[in-house]
Every structure is written in structure tokens, then in C-alpha cells.
Image (cartoon, rainbow, N blue to C red):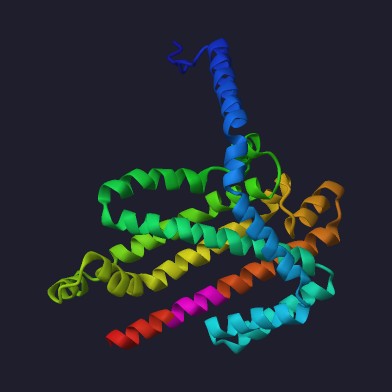
């Protein structure tokens, strides 16, 4: 006797009608509000274009010196600093300097935007269990949704260009800084907070003078993951017009240019390693400094 039960499904006609209605409503929303939303992001776009032009127009040796100097100040590691210099020189020698500058520009702007938006959200989550329970599922969706799916509603709303690419990268890269800011503040020792209360500290004073400084290594780990996520979206964002190292990779895929794809992929890897090692070294320095203060 066959005991197999078929799973109940929505009728195909009903499902198509529902999908058509949702699509039509979203198209109407896009036509009504797309221009206004794009105008709201215009200052950010102008800043990104200015920063990109600045990096490209500045002599390569100046950019190299500034980047190497920042890496040294953050890491205080000769190995990381020398590796950064060698990687950037090789990128220039193989003719990928301009694309790398474009990638650095969008990564820097997206990371800055992710921090400006994510840090306050993480702080708010750390102060409210209810808010944490509400936002965590949203972050789960943001982190697990396939990156290509982000492109559909954003391209329908804003078309193809830098602004939709910027939004895609920010949406994908923001959850780590939110989660680890929340976690870092929640992990601050309760006895330290009680001591701050005993000295009459207000809520803002505790946040600025106690919680944020003590949770800074964890927040830096979130910043590291945010940068890595942003770099991971470089190739995907190139599908909607974001110029940089992702576009040559996409061209290599379409035209089967093995060498071009590998070289630009290695350039992305080099930039990722520079950011990763530098931010990790900076986080470890902060951790040692904190342990020395409390040891």
C-alpha cells in the first residue's frame, strides 16, 4: 500500500498571479521613488568619484608611500610592511594600478559607510535584548542571502552604476561590524561597569570611556571581516558597472582569458591579505595595550 503523501502546493496559476502582482508593485515603487533615492545618494557618489580620481591622479610613489606608512603605523611589522610594498609594486608592474586604485576607493568608502551605519546599530543592540532579537534575523538574511540576489531589487530600483554597486557591497559587508560591536560591548566585565557606576559615570561616559575602549579589539575584528566581505563583492559588483579589479576578472570569464583572470584575481587576494594582516596586527596591539593597562 502506498503511504506517500504529496506535499500541498499553491496552485501554479495563483502563484504566478501573486508573483506578477508583487513585481508590478515593485516596478511602480521603483518608477515613483528611484530618482529620489538616487538623488539622496548623489553626495556619496560624488565623494567616491572624487576619491577615486585623487588616487588615480596622485603619483604612484606617493600613494605607495602613504599606504606603506599607514600599514607600518597600524601593524608595526616589518614583514607586513615589506610585503605590502612588494605587492603594490608588482600590481603596478603588471599594469593593474588604476583598477586597484578604483577598488581601494570603493572598498574604503563602503567600509566607512558600513562602520558609520553599523557601529550605532551594534551599540543599540548591546543595550537592548529585544532589539538584538529583532535585528539578528535580519543580519542572518543579509549574510546568507546569495550575493547575486541582492542585485535584482537594487538594479530594478536604481539601474546600473556605482550607486547600486555601492549599496550591494554595503548591505553584504555591514553585518560583521554590527554583530561584533554588539558582542564586544556585551563581553565587557560586569565588575568594570559596576566600578564605573560607583564613580558616578553616566551611560554615555560608560560607553565612551569604558565599554568602547575595552571592546575595541573585538570591534576591530568586525572591521576586518567587513573589509573582507566588501572585497568578496568586488567581482559581483562589477556585473552592475562597478569598475576596478572585478571587471577584468569578469571579462576573463566571458572571454576565457586565463592569464588576465589569474593576475587580477591575485591582485584582489593581495589587497585582501594586506587589509587582513594589518587590521589583525592592529587589533593584537590594542589587545596587548589593554592587557598591559589592566595587568
Quadrant in which the C terminus appears: bottom left
Name the residue rendered at 59%, 80% in the picture: 71
Question: In the image, is 134 to the left or to the right of 87?
Answer: left
Please identify the dominant SS of the magenta region: helix
Front residue of 32/132: it is 32
Give how far across and how far down residue 202 sits, in percent. 21, 68
Name the residue rendered at 56%, 76% in the picture: 278
Give how far across and how far down residue 21 sits, in percent. 56, 18
Q: Is residue 192 visible?
A: yes
Question: In the image, is 227 to the left or to the right of 216?
Answer: right
Q: Is residue 188 visible?
A: no
Residue found at the very far left of the displayed protein: 198
Q: Is residue 280 magenta?
A: yes
Q: Is residue 120 magenta?
A: no
Give how far across and how far down residue 13 sits, in percent. 57, 10
Front residue of 37/229: it is 37
Give how far across and how far down residue 94 sits, in percent. 84, 71
Q: What segment carries the magenta color?
A: 278-285
**Would you identify the image quadrant in which residue 125 lies?**
bottom left
Name the residue rendered at 39%, 84% in the picture: 288
Quadrant in which the N terminus appears: top left
**Would you identify the image quadrant in which residue 84 lies?**
bottom right
Amino acid at each position: 500500500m502506498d503511504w506517500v503523501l504529496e506535499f500541498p502546493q499553491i496552485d501554479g496559476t495563483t502563484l504566478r498571479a501573486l508573483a506578477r502582482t508583487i513585481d508590478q508593485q515593485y516596478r511602480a515603487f521603483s518608477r515613483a521613488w528611484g530618482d529620489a533615492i538616487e538623488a539622496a545618494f548623489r553626495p556619496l557618489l560624488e565623494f567616491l568619484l572624487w576619491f577615486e580620481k585623487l588616487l588615480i591622479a596622485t603619483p604612484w610613489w606617493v600613494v605607495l608611500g602613504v599606504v606603506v606608512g599607514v600599514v607600518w603605523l597600524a601593524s608595526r611589522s616589518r614583514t607586513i610592511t615589506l610585503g605590502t610594498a612588494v605587492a603594490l609594486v608588482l600590481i603596478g608592474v603588471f599594469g593593474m594600478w588604476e583598477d586597484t586604485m578604483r577598488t581601494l576607493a570603493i572598498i574604503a568608502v563602503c567600509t566607512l559607510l558600513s562602520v558609520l551605519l553599523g557601529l550605532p546599530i551594534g551599540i543599540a543592540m548591546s543595550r537592548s535584548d529585544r532589539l538584538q532579537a529583532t535585528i539578528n534575523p535580519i543580519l542572518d538574511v543579509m549574510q546568507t542571502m546569495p550575493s547575486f540576489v541582492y542585485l535584482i531589487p537594487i538594479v530594478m530600483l536604481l539601474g546600473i552604476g556605482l550607486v547600486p554597486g555601492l549599496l550591494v557591497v554595503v548591505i553584504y559587508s555591514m553585518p560583521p561590524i554590527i554583530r561584533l560591536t554588539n558582542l564586544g560591548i556585551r563581553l565587557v566585565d560586569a565588575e568594570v561597569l559596576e566600578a564605573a557606576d560607583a564613580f558616578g559615570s553616566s551611560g554615555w561616559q560608560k560607553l565612551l570611556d569604558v565599554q568602547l575602549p575595552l571592546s575595541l579589539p573585538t570591534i576591530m575584528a568586525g572591521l576586518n571581516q567587513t573589509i573582507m566581505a566588501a572585497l568578496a563583492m568586488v567581482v559581483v559588483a562589477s556585473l552592475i558597472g562597478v569598475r576596478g579589479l572585478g571587471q577584468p576578472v569578469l571579462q576573463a570569464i566571458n572571454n576565457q582569458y586565463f592569464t588576465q583572470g589569474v593576475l587580477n584575481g591575485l591582485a584582489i587576494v593581495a589587497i585582501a591579505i594586506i587589509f587582513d594582516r594589518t587590521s589583525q596586527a592592529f587589533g593584537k596591539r590594542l589587545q596587548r595595550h589593554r592587557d598591559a593597562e589592566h595587568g
